[in-house]
Image: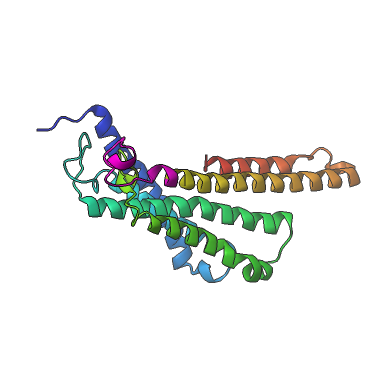
Protein backbone atom coordinates (compact mmCIF):
# COMPACT_ATOMS: atom_id res chain seq x y z
CA UNK A 1 0.00 0.00 0.00
CA UNK A 2 1.37 3.42 -0.98
CA UNK A 3 2.08 5.95 1.74
CA UNK A 4 0.75 9.46 1.29
CA UNK A 5 1.81 12.34 3.51
CA UNK A 6 -0.78 14.39 5.42
CA UNK A 7 0.03 17.28 3.07
CA UNK A 8 -0.73 15.16 0.00
CA UNK A 9 -4.07 14.13 1.47
CA UNK A 10 -4.94 17.70 2.48
CA UNK A 11 -4.27 19.25 -0.94
CA UNK A 12 -6.30 16.44 -2.54
CA UNK A 13 -9.34 16.63 -0.24
CA UNK A 14 -9.61 20.31 0.76
CA UNK A 15 -10.35 21.63 -2.76
CA UNK A 16 -13.27 19.20 -3.00
CA UNK A 17 -15.01 20.94 -0.10
CA UNK A 18 -14.15 24.51 -1.08
CA UNK A 19 -15.01 23.76 -4.71
CA UNK A 20 -18.35 22.28 -3.69
CA UNK A 21 -19.26 25.40 -1.68
CA UNK A 22 -18.29 27.61 -4.61
CA UNK A 23 -20.31 25.42 -6.97
CA UNK A 24 -23.39 25.74 -4.75
CA UNK A 25 -23.12 29.53 -4.75
CA UNK A 26 -22.67 29.73 -8.52
CA UNK A 27 -25.49 27.24 -9.10
CA UNK A 28 -27.85 29.34 -6.97
CA UNK A 29 -27.07 32.43 -9.03
CA UNK A 30 -27.37 30.43 -12.26
CA UNK A 31 -30.78 28.98 -11.44
CA UNK A 32 -32.03 32.32 -10.10
CA UNK A 33 -31.21 34.03 -13.37
CA UNK A 34 -32.49 31.20 -15.60
CA UNK A 35 -35.68 30.26 -13.71
CA UNK A 36 -36.79 33.86 -13.34
CA UNK A 37 -35.76 34.56 -16.95
CA UNK A 38 -33.70 37.55 -15.92
CA UNK A 39 -31.26 36.97 -18.78
CA UNK A 40 -33.59 38.65 -21.26
CA UNK A 41 -34.16 41.82 -19.34
CA UNK A 42 -30.91 43.50 -18.31
CA UNK A 43 -27.27 43.59 -19.30
CA UNK A 44 -26.37 43.12 -15.64
CA UNK A 45 -28.18 39.78 -15.42
CA UNK A 46 -26.54 38.48 -18.60
CA UNK A 47 -23.10 39.38 -17.25
CA UNK A 48 -23.84 37.69 -13.92
CA UNK A 49 -25.07 34.65 -15.87
CA UNK A 50 -21.77 34.46 -17.77
CA UNK A 51 -19.79 34.95 -14.56
CA UNK A 52 -21.68 32.19 -12.74
CA UNK A 53 -21.16 29.77 -15.67
CA UNK A 54 -17.39 30.33 -15.70
CA UNK A 55 -17.19 30.01 -11.93
CA UNK A 56 -19.17 26.76 -12.04
CA UNK A 57 -16.59 25.34 -14.45
CA UNK A 58 -13.72 26.35 -12.16
CA UNK A 59 -15.57 24.95 -9.12
CA UNK A 60 -16.14 21.55 -10.77
CA UNK A 61 -12.43 21.39 -11.61
CA UNK A 62 -11.61 21.99 -7.93
CA UNK A 63 -14.07 19.30 -6.83
CA UNK A 64 -12.31 16.80 -9.06
CA UNK A 65 -8.90 17.91 -7.68
CA UNK A 66 -6.46 14.97 -8.01
CA UNK A 67 -8.87 12.41 -9.52
CA UNK A 68 -8.04 13.17 -13.20
CA UNK A 69 -4.26 13.07 -12.58
CA UNK A 70 -2.74 9.94 -14.16
CA UNK A 71 -2.91 6.95 -11.86
CA UNK A 72 0.38 6.06 -10.24
CA UNK A 73 1.68 9.65 -10.16
CA UNK A 74 4.26 9.83 -7.42
CA UNK A 75 2.95 11.20 -4.13
CA UNK A 76 -0.46 12.22 -5.49
CA UNK A 77 -3.32 11.02 -3.30
CA UNK A 78 -6.44 9.70 -5.13
CA UNK A 79 -4.86 10.05 -8.59
CA UNK A 80 -7.06 7.82 -10.77
CA UNK A 81 -6.96 9.27 -14.28
CA UNK A 82 -4.99 9.16 -17.50
CA UNK A 83 -3.14 11.67 -19.66
CA UNK A 84 -6.42 12.33 -21.48
CA UNK A 85 -8.43 13.05 -18.31
CA UNK A 86 -5.62 15.28 -17.09
CA UNK A 87 -5.66 17.21 -20.35
CA UNK A 88 -9.43 17.65 -20.11
CA UNK A 89 -9.24 18.92 -16.54
CA UNK A 90 -6.41 21.28 -17.44
CA UNK A 91 -8.40 22.69 -20.36
CA UNK A 92 -11.48 23.44 -18.25
CA UNK A 93 -9.33 24.68 -15.39
CA UNK A 94 -7.71 27.25 -17.65
CA UNK A 95 -11.04 28.13 -19.28
CA UNK A 96 -12.86 28.75 -16.01
CA UNK A 97 -10.03 30.49 -14.21
CA UNK A 98 -9.45 32.95 -17.05
CA UNK A 99 -13.09 33.65 -17.89
CA UNK A 100 -14.08 34.32 -14.27
CA UNK A 101 -11.81 37.34 -13.56
CA UNK A 102 -12.42 38.67 -17.07
CA UNK A 103 -16.18 38.53 -16.50
CA UNK A 104 -15.62 40.31 -13.18
CA UNK A 105 -13.83 43.02 -15.16
CA UNK A 106 -16.79 43.22 -17.55
CA UNK A 107 -19.16 43.57 -14.61
CA UNK A 108 -16.97 46.36 -13.26
CA UNK A 109 -17.10 48.13 -16.63
CA UNK A 110 -20.89 47.91 -16.45
CA UNK A 111 -20.86 49.58 -13.00
CA UNK A 112 -18.53 52.31 -14.26
CA UNK A 113 -20.71 53.06 -17.28
CA UNK A 114 -23.91 53.19 -15.20
CA UNK A 115 -22.74 54.90 -12.00
CA UNK A 116 -19.84 57.07 -13.12
CA UNK A 117 -20.71 57.86 -16.73
CA UNK A 118 -24.52 57.73 -16.54
CA UNK A 119 -25.05 55.45 -19.54
CA UNK A 120 -28.55 54.13 -20.20
CA UNK A 121 -29.37 50.42 -20.51
CA UNK A 122 -30.00 50.58 -24.27
CA UNK A 123 -26.72 52.40 -24.86
CA UNK A 124 -24.77 49.75 -22.95
CA UNK A 125 -26.63 46.92 -24.68
CA UNK A 126 -25.81 48.10 -28.18
CA UNK A 127 -22.35 49.60 -27.64
CA UNK A 128 -20.53 47.85 -24.81
CA UNK A 129 -22.24 44.55 -24.01
CA UNK A 130 -20.97 42.58 -27.04
CA UNK A 131 -17.38 43.27 -25.98
CA UNK A 132 -18.20 42.48 -22.35
CA UNK A 133 -18.97 38.91 -23.40
CA UNK A 134 -16.64 38.59 -26.39
CA UNK A 135 -13.42 39.41 -24.53
CA UNK A 136 -13.81 36.92 -21.63
CA UNK A 137 -15.04 34.10 -23.87
CA UNK A 138 -12.54 34.63 -26.70
CA UNK A 139 -9.48 35.12 -24.49
CA UNK A 140 -10.32 32.21 -22.18
CA UNK A 141 -11.10 29.76 -24.99
CA UNK A 142 -8.08 30.82 -27.07
CA UNK A 143 -5.54 30.29 -24.26
CA UNK A 144 -7.25 27.09 -23.09
CA UNK A 145 -7.27 25.61 -26.60
CA UNK A 146 -3.61 26.53 -27.20
CA UNK A 147 -2.71 24.42 -24.18
CA UNK A 148 -3.76 21.22 -25.98
CA UNK A 149 -1.30 21.16 -28.95
CA UNK A 150 1.46 22.46 -26.66
CA UNK A 151 0.74 19.56 -24.23
CA UNK A 152 0.65 22.04 -21.34
CA UNK A 153 -1.86 20.26 -19.13
CA UNK A 154 -0.10 17.96 -16.72
CA UNK A 155 0.10 17.15 -13.02
CA UNK A 156 0.73 20.43 -11.18
CA UNK A 157 0.44 18.98 -7.67
CA UNK A 158 -3.22 18.98 -6.68
CA UNK A 159 -4.86 19.13 -10.10
CA UNK A 160 -3.97 19.23 -13.78
CA UNK A 161 -2.93 22.61 -15.07
CA UNK A 162 -0.10 24.28 -16.97
CA UNK A 163 3.00 22.34 -15.95
CA UNK A 164 6.02 20.67 -17.46
CA UNK A 165 6.39 16.90 -17.37
CA UNK A 166 8.22 15.24 -15.77
CA UNK A 167 8.11 17.64 -12.85
CA UNK A 168 10.96 20.18 -12.59
CA UNK A 169 12.29 19.24 -16.03
CA UNK A 170 13.89 21.87 -18.26
CA UNK A 171 14.12 22.25 -22.01
CA UNK A 172 14.70 19.05 -23.96
CA UNK A 173 14.41 16.93 -20.83
CA UNK A 174 10.64 17.61 -20.80
CA UNK A 175 8.41 15.19 -22.68
CA UNK A 176 5.35 17.44 -22.24
CA UNK A 177 4.74 21.10 -21.43
CA UNK A 178 8.04 22.49 -22.69
CA UNK A 179 6.58 26.01 -22.88
CA UNK A 180 4.70 25.80 -19.58
CA UNK A 181 6.57 28.70 -17.95
CA UNK A 182 5.74 31.06 -20.82
CA UNK A 183 2.05 30.20 -20.71
CA UNK A 184 1.96 30.60 -16.94
CA UNK A 185 3.29 34.13 -17.35
CA UNK A 186 0.59 34.82 -19.96
CA UNK A 187 -2.06 33.36 -17.63
CA UNK A 188 -1.06 35.55 -14.68
CA UNK A 189 -0.65 38.62 -16.89
CA UNK A 190 -4.27 38.27 -18.05
CA UNK A 191 -5.58 37.70 -14.53
CA UNK A 192 -3.67 40.61 -12.99
CA UNK A 193 -4.71 42.89 -15.84
CA UNK A 194 -8.34 42.06 -15.01
CA UNK A 195 -7.77 42.59 -11.28
CA UNK A 196 -6.04 45.94 -11.79
CA UNK A 197 -8.81 47.04 -14.17
CA UNK A 198 -11.42 46.23 -11.53
CA UNK A 199 -9.41 48.06 -8.86
CA UNK A 200 -9.09 51.21 -10.98
CA UNK A 201 -12.73 51.03 -12.08
CA UNK A 202 -14.14 50.67 -8.57
CA UNK A 203 -11.91 53.47 -7.30
CA UNK A 204 -13.19 55.76 -10.07
CA UNK A 205 -16.77 55.00 -8.97
CA UNK A 206 -15.88 55.85 -5.37
CA UNK A 207 -14.29 59.14 -6.49
CA UNK A 208 -17.40 60.04 -8.52
CA UNK A 209 -19.77 59.41 -5.60
CA UNK A 210 -17.50 61.24 -3.15
CA UNK A 211 -17.18 64.32 -5.40
CA UNK A 212 -20.95 64.50 -5.93
CA UNK A 213 -21.47 64.19 -2.20
CA UNK A 214 -19.14 67.12 -1.52
CA UNK A 215 -20.96 69.31 -4.03
CA UNK A 216 -24.34 68.48 -2.47
CA UNK A 217 -23.09 69.16 1.05
CA UNK A 218 -21.81 72.59 0.00
CA UNK A 219 -25.15 73.48 -1.53
CA UNK A 220 -27.21 72.27 1.40
CA UNK A 221 -25.86 72.71 4.95
CA UNK A 222 -28.51 70.35 6.34
CA UNK A 223 -26.77 67.49 4.58
CA UNK A 224 -23.39 68.31 6.08
CA UNK A 225 -23.92 65.87 8.95
CA UNK A 226 -24.56 63.06 6.51
CA UNK A 227 -21.52 63.94 4.42
CA UNK A 228 -19.59 60.86 3.44
CA UNK A 229 -22.32 58.30 4.15
CA UNK A 230 -22.87 57.25 0.53
CA UNK A 231 -19.20 57.31 -0.37
CA UNK A 232 -18.36 55.15 2.65
CA UNK A 233 -20.97 52.60 1.60
CA UNK A 234 -19.59 52.61 -1.94
CA UNK A 235 -16.05 52.23 -0.60
CA UNK A 236 -17.07 49.17 1.44
CA UNK A 237 -18.92 47.56 -1.47
CA UNK A 238 -16.05 48.30 -3.84
CA UNK A 239 -13.57 46.90 -1.34
CA UNK A 240 -15.51 43.65 -1.05
CA UNK A 241 -15.84 43.34 -4.84
CA UNK A 242 -12.12 43.96 -5.41
CA UNK A 243 -11.01 41.98 -2.36
CA UNK A 244 -12.71 38.84 -3.63
CA UNK A 245 -10.33 38.85 -6.62
CA UNK A 246 -7.08 39.14 -4.67
Q: Quadrant of the N terminus?
A: top left
Q: Is residue 233 left or right of residue 61?
A: right
Of 3 and 147, the residue lying toward us: 147
| Residue 243 picture quarter | top right
The residue at the point 23 percent across, 37 percent down is 76
Identity of the residue furthest to the left in this view: 1
Does 174 appear in magenta?
yes
**Left or right of residue 214: residue 31:** left
Specify whether residue 135 is painted magenta: no
Residue at the location (52% across, 67% down)? Answer: 38
Q: Foreground residue, 112 or 162?
A: 162
Question: Can residue 139 be seen from the camera position used here?
Answer: yes
Q: Is residue 24 visible?
A: no
Q: Position of residue 185 (x, y in %)?
A: 47, 43
Residue 64 percent across, percent down from the top left: 28, 48
**Which segment did they paint magenta?**
165-183
**Image point 31% across, 35% down: which residue?**
168
Give the quarter of the image for residue 169: top left
7 left or right of 108 in image: left
- Residue at point 29% right, 44% down? 65
Question: Toward the viewer: 91 or 201?
Answer: 91
Amino acid sequence: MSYYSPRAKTIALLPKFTGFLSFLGSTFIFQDVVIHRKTVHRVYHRLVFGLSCSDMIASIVNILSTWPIPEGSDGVYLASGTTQTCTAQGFFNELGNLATPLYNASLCVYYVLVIRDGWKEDQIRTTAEPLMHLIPITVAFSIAILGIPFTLYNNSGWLCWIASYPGKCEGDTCTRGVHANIFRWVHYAIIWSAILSVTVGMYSIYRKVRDEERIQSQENDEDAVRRGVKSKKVAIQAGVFVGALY
